[in-house]
Image (spheres, helix red, strand yellow):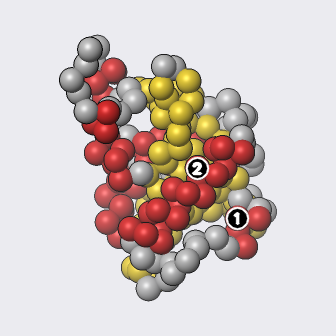
């Protein structure tokens, strides 16, 4: 018998891949609503826009008993112009932000996926508090811009740091810091 609280359990393994199953896509939408509407209040009712019609949603999925369980992180990518790609709506569930890894894994999947599809330039508008993370991941700041009433930094990824991957739906497994050190 375990005396640990059920709410305190966080999966030690995560699947990082393109969202494809209906439950994954629903999880992506719910997480974006939670972060951008409820927590940050950037949007009144819904953060969905025309880009969602052309974007590829990517997800960080927690596991339970080694099986995919729930979406705990997301970002979307799309081709803005020939060979120019953009990432947006990066979100990690509040319960999983302290892991400090899922956002970086999603960024890596986003840029590597676009690179595998012929991207020459990958850009994102990054909320100012997240600029240090992107700099650590070899992104370069270009200019400040205000979007939806929030200050952002337009940034560009150093593609030499992100090898192209052919199949974002295959993805990979990311281990929590505790599992990596064992």
Report the disc number at residue 120.
none
User: Which residue corresponds to mark 2?
Assistant: 27
Which residue is located at x 37 percent, y 40 percent? 101
Q: Nearer the viewer, residue 92 or 120?
A: 92
Disc 2 from disc 1: Cα separation: 15 Å
The answer to which quarter of the image holds residue 53 is bottom right
Q: Nearer the viewer, residue 76 or 131?
A: 76
Which residue is located at x 25 percent, y 33 percent? 5
Q: Is residue 73 in view?
A: yes
Q: Nearer the viewer, residue 4 or 55?
A: 4
Q: Of the two numbered discs 2 and 1 on the same chain, state the one appearing first in sequence.
A: 2
Rendered position, 162 above or below 144: above
Rendered position, 59 above or below 128: above
Which residue is located at x 43 percent, y 69 percent? 38
Q: Secondary structure at mark 1?
A: helix
Rendered position, 153 above or below 21: below
Report the disc number at residue 52.
1
Q: Please state the horizontal and vertical placement of residue 30, each as a whole percent of the image.
A: 55, 57
Which image quarter holds the N terminus? top left
Q: Please state the horizontal and vertical placement of residue 114, each as a whole percent of the image.
A: 67, 49
Q: Residue furthest left?
A: 3
């Amino acid at each position: 018998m375990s005396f640990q609280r059920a709410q305190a359990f966080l999966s030690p393994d995560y699947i990082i891949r393109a969202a494809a199953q209906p439950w994954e896509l629903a999880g992506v939408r719910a997480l974006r609503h939670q972060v951008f509407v409820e927590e940050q209040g950037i949007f009144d009712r819904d953060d969905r826009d025309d880009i969602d019609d052309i974007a590829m949603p990517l997800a960080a999925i927690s596991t339970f008993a080694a099986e995919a369980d729930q979406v705990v992180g997301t970002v979307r990518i799309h081709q803005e112009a020939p060979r120019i790609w953009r990432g947006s709506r990066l979100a990690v569930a509040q319960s999983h932000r302290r892991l400090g890894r899922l956002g970086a894994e999603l960024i890596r999947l986003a840029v590597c996926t676009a690179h595998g599809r012929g991207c020459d330039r990958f850009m994102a508008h990054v909320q100012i508090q997240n600029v240090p993370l992107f700099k650590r991941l070899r992104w370069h700041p270009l200019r400040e811009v205000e979007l939806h009433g929030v200050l952002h930094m337009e940034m560009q990824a150093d593609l030499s740091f992100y090898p192209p991957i052919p199949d974002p739906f295959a993805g990979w497994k990311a281990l929590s810091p505790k599992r990596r050190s064992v």
